[in-house]
Amino acid sequence: MRAIYLIARREYLSYVATWGFWLSLLSVPLFMLVGGGLPALIEGSQPTRHYAMIDETGDGYAEALRDAFAQRSRDEALEALRAAAEPLGREDQLPAAEAALNAEPGLEGLPEAVEALGLPASSVSIDGSSRFIEVDPPARDAEALRPYLLGEQTIMTEEGEQPLFAAIIIRNDADSPVGVTVDYWSASLTDTALRNRVQDRLSDILRERRLADAGVPRDLLNEINAIDVDARELNPERTGEAAAVSTAERIPFVVGVAMAFILWTIIFSVVNMLLTAMIEERGNKVLEVLLASARFHEILIGKLMGVAAVSATLLIFWGGLGMLGLVGVQTLLEVSELPVADIIGAVLDPGLLLPAFGYFIIGYLMYGAVFLAIGSLCDTLQEAQTLMSPIMLVMFIPLFVVMAAIESPDSAVVQIVSWIPIWTPFVMIARIPSDPPMWEMLATTGLMVGFAIVVIALAGAVFRQGALGRANADSVRKLLKLGKKKPA
Amino acid sequence: MAETILALEGATKRFGGVPAVRAMDLTVERGTITGFLGPNGAGKTTSLRMALGIITPDEGRARLFGKAPNARTLDRVGFLPEERGIYKKMVAEDAVTFFGRLKGMSAGKARQRAGEMLERVGLGDARKKKIKEMSKGMAQKVQIAAALVHDPEFIILDEPFSGLDPVNQKVLERMIRAENEAGKTILFSTHVMEHAERLCDRIVLIAKGRKVFDGTVNEALGTVPRRVLIETGEGPGAGPVLAAHGAVTDDGMTGEGTHRYTLDLAPGSDAQDALKALVDAGVRLARFEPVRAHLHEAFVHLVESAEREPA
């Protein structure tokens, strides 16, 4: 035990003392922060686009489109106000907020509406709507508009001289079944948001006009447009009001799958650490010295424990930071829709956390021992990569299965894969929230533990040969060649 | 009777069916310095690994302090393997402390002893230096310090002099002698016969996995014929006279006008008898020089004899 502890301690300290450890410790939260903030940053940094609209039909489509855009923006604002009010129980203040919004044209009344909910004016914003601004057309036909669209000439806006982003020309078209076509002129081939918006709204307008022409009253039309079926999800295990399935109930499934991914990521990154350290140690010839003080199994277990402690440190740090982040988001931005308490509750649920811990230990020992054995056979990382390739392929399969388990955790494929010991840790953890039968959990776990013992014993034997320099990567190649038939 | 510290009793080890060590009997008595000699691939490292319990003999057994090698007995052994290895990214003092702790020392005691040992091998000023920043010789001295940090009763050194310059070889030789004078038992393997000749009370020579000699240095020297170099002036030839005392090689005339012979004395013959016979025969002697045999000759002679034997 002393040797195991000392070897584990030395391994742990040697990792913690490296820049790489601190980089990986900080890189994940940094990545999450950047990953989380990047879409908002990209959205926020989008330049304002100026467009012109020319209606050649004389049927008022341009005006109808302007009204539709304004209404859409107001609907989005109302939705955002509702989303902000509901978690805080301030639904009764919504009519006042709506009135404040409608009191001003466009979205000018939004800050007052937000304040009517008792929130800071800046805490609710509508993304995307305001980055397209209509300007008066600098010319009346496509040919004359071309220099403005190509940036050769500019238009005067509130932001100064700007190029014209797009020109929308609505014209009659006898060939079109609806009689109208939109020519959307723009030098940008990728930003299609405005084109899509025009297309959608104009289709709505044409549809409504045709229905009105067919004699459908305006009230009925509004009623039809407002149809939105509410499908209540109910759990047959419960009765009455309690049968309704809440968002919080789905969280354990998401947490289960997330844990399976985290488990995979940690095992994958940590066993690579083991492999490179082992190759370095083989190069340093330290094993022979260690063997005079410790036995093979003590060195093997010590190394595995040391690196497990490294991953536990990463996990505790990241997990703690994640929890703090969740609580922080809720506390600082009062209006967050995140069900933080439910997420934390699901993560800390012993029914999920304890099996997750067990699966991590077994999975880590199983893969760790194999990677250590490979490391003990190889002098260089290149040599190791040849032996690792098949194992890496095997390791990637559960990722796809876990993804499938998000939709249907009890599908036949997911169930079958649970029985394959090398994949059990990842797949079973994703299945736990769907309450698989106890016998299946025990049997798959038992099979996995038995298999892990065999793998660790075999890896130990390979490690013993590799550590004493009695086997190397060529030995494995020779062994594999033995299995191939010689040509006649 | 001296206590037996290490005993290999009929130990045989095969790798892939090929014997690396065959029926090896080896004992090391307390307080002695034993040289473990043999050509490359003779089975020295395999024998030492069996002695330490790193590998198990296929036949026979290894006893360390009278017991099968285990954690407790290994704590009493200091081992410097042939394959030098140490954690290069560690500071010298930390590395030596780590190996001291592995041998059961407390953290404080191990650190104190690490400082003392590094001082002793001449690395007192480099104790806080990372091993990767040291020269090969310095790193080797750190490893010697690591092998001895726990003040072991029994020290096994596998090729301890290789990689050291002549000055540091002397330092190590003095250390080995000092440890032995302090009552430690030492077993070391080497290719450098001068060290074995100077240091060892006893030598064990192995070849092709078999022990071919086990005895004192003088007994080893006794296995090679004693040699006499003779040069004669004008007059009767010495050849026929010398033939009665051993094998004579006629080396011909020297540049100085003398005739040179080499006499390998026959067992039981004495150089004095040969000298008397030459004088009695009226041979004019210009040179009569009995040559002292060295362990090197004994080594080559014994190994070549063993290799001539069928496997």
Image (tube, coloured by chain):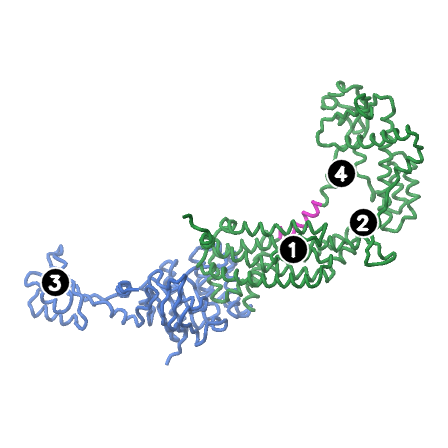
Taking the spot 56% from the left edge, 56% from the top edge, the residue there is: A274
Q: Secondary structure at mark 3?
A: strand
Is disc 2 in the same subunit as disc 1?
A: yes
Q: Which residue is mark 1?
A: A416
Q: Which mark is residue A44?
A: 4
Q: Secondary structure at mark 1?
A: helix
Q: Which residue is mark 3?
A: B286
Question: Mark 1 and 4 residues: CB-CB less than 8 Å, in contact?
Answer: no
Label 2 environment density (alpha carbons within 10 Å; few <14, some 14–19, many ≥20): some
Q: Secondary structure at mark 2?
A: loop
Q: Secondary structure at mark 4?
A: helix
Q: Which residue is mark 2?
A: A337
- Is residue A33 covered in magenta? yes
Instruction: Describe residue A208's horizontal placement relative to residue A414 as left or right.
Output: right
Chain (blue): B
Give the letter of the chain under mark 3. Answer: B
Name the residue nearer the viewer: B21 or B183. Answer: B21
Is disc 1 in the same subunit as disc 4?
A: yes
Is disc 2 in the same subunit as disc 4?
A: yes
Residues in magenta, as a range:
A22-35
| Spatial CA span between label 1 and label 4 | 46 Å
Q: Earlier in the sequence, mark 1 or mark 4?
A: 4
The spot of residue A332 in percent (x, y) is: 80, 50
- The answer to whether residue A136 is visible is no
- Is residue B99 covered in magenta? no
Name the residue nearer the viewer: B283 or A78. Answer: A78
